[in-house]
């Protein structure tokens, strides 16, 4: 689930914490990031991503969505302002010197602002993506608004911008697990409380950014895991449970998230949670 799910990392205060963040970034790239592959594919198919595409990915994480675009022939650039650990993994996947990469030479991956991915000689982007879903935590669209404000001037007129949000709670099984984070984080819930996705979340973000909505879609993205341990690692890698860990402790969060996952464990031990995500295509004026 970019950030995919919204990320709110615990501060790094030492070597041990840094190692923990590195392990979580690896869990993200190996377990959780792939859950939104059907969404990436649907957006790329709809927007006909190919060799003529110059894509800027906001909150690119460890780069899976960019790699998929590059495999279609697109020139890609990514911005990951929140997790240098995930960005390091994206560079392993996408930089030209990486073994077996299909990305074009000139791929740019930066930790700062979108403008850091461009210079005077960079052609305007023909597509901007923000694949990290909003509509999960109160205020989770604020950081996206700042990224869009910096990215839109770098895109050509009429270029599509793809925004992503969680679907209705009744169609997202993972919502019941995410509520654990809110309950455990109380009294910190004012800063990071779970809330159900609203129908017009994406349109409101687009409107504030000065974008013109131009169609939307819904995509089924089930979260499937080999076992409960894999599910726990994947979900914790999103950062959505950080406030709960800070308010209680790691053991308590592990215990209660695992209990919340039990209804979705199948007889063979795998965990399966159906979810629906919504995307909005908006145009740069």
Image (spheres, helix red, strand yellow):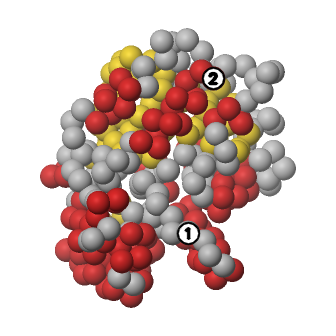
Splitting the image into 4 quarters, where does residue 266 fall? bottom left
Residue 114 placement (x, y as % from top left): 63, 35
Describe residue 58's horizontal placement relative to residue 88 as left or right: left
Query: In front: 148, or 233?
Result: 148
Describe residue 75's horizontal placement relative to residue 151 as left or right: right
Around disc 2, counting alpha carbons within 10 Å, would you say few (fewer than 14), some (14 to 19), or many (20 or more)? many
Residue name at image x 60 percent, y 71 percent: 12
Q: Point out which mark residue 154 bears.
A: 2
Residue name at image x 29 percent, y 64 percent: 189
Residue 269 visible in the picture: no
Query: In front: 116, or 247?
Result: 247
Above or below for 122 versus 14: above
Above or below for 89 versus 27: above
Residue 282 visible in the picture: yes
Residue 223 placement (x, y as % from top left): 35, 60
Splitting the image into 4 quarters, where does residue 141 fall? top left
- Secondary structure of the residue carrying numbered label 1: loop
Q: Point out which mark residue 11 bears.
A: 1
Residue name at image x 48 percent, y 50 percent: 2
Splitting the image into 4 quarters, where does residue 246 fall? bottom left
Q: Quadrant of the N terminus?
A: bottom left
Above or below for 115 versus 253: above
Describe residue 100's horizontal placement relative to residue 259 as left or right: right
């Amino acid at each position: 689930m970019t950030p995919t799910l919204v990320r709110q990392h615990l501060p790094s205060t030492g070597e041990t914490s840094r190692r923990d963040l590195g392990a979580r970034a690896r869990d993200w790239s190996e377990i959780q990031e792939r859950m939104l592959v059907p969404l990436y594919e649907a957006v790329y198919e709809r927007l006909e991503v190919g060799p003529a595409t110059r894509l800027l990915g906001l909150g690119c994480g460890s780069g899976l969505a960019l790699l998929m675009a590059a495999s279609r022939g697109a020139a890609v650039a990514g911005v990951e302002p929140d997790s240098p650990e995930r960005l390091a993994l994206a560079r392993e996947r996408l930089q030209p010197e990486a073994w077996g990469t299909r990305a074009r030479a000139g791929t740019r991956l930066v930790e700062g602002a979108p403008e850091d991915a461009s210079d005077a000689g960079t052609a305007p982007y023909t597509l901007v993506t923000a694949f990290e879903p909003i509509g999960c935590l109160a205020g989770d669209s604020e950081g996206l608004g700042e990224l869009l404000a910096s990215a839109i001037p770098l895109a050509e007129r009429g270029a599509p911008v793809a925004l992503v949000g969680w679907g209705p709670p009744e169609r997202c099984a993972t919502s019941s697990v995410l509520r654990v984070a809110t309950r455990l984080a109380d009294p910190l819930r004012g800063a990071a409380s779970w809330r159900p996705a609203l129908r017009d979340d994406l349109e409101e973000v687009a409107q504030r950014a000065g974008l013109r909505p131009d169609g939307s879609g819904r995509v089924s993205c089930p979260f499937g895991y080999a076992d409960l341990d894999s599910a726990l690692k994947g979900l914790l890698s999103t950062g959505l449970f950080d406030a709960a860990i800070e308010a209680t402790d790691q053991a308590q969060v592990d215990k209660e998230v695992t209990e919340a996952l039990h209804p979705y464990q199948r007889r063979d031990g795998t965990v399966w949670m159906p979810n629906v995500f919504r995307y909005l295509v908006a145009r740069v004026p």
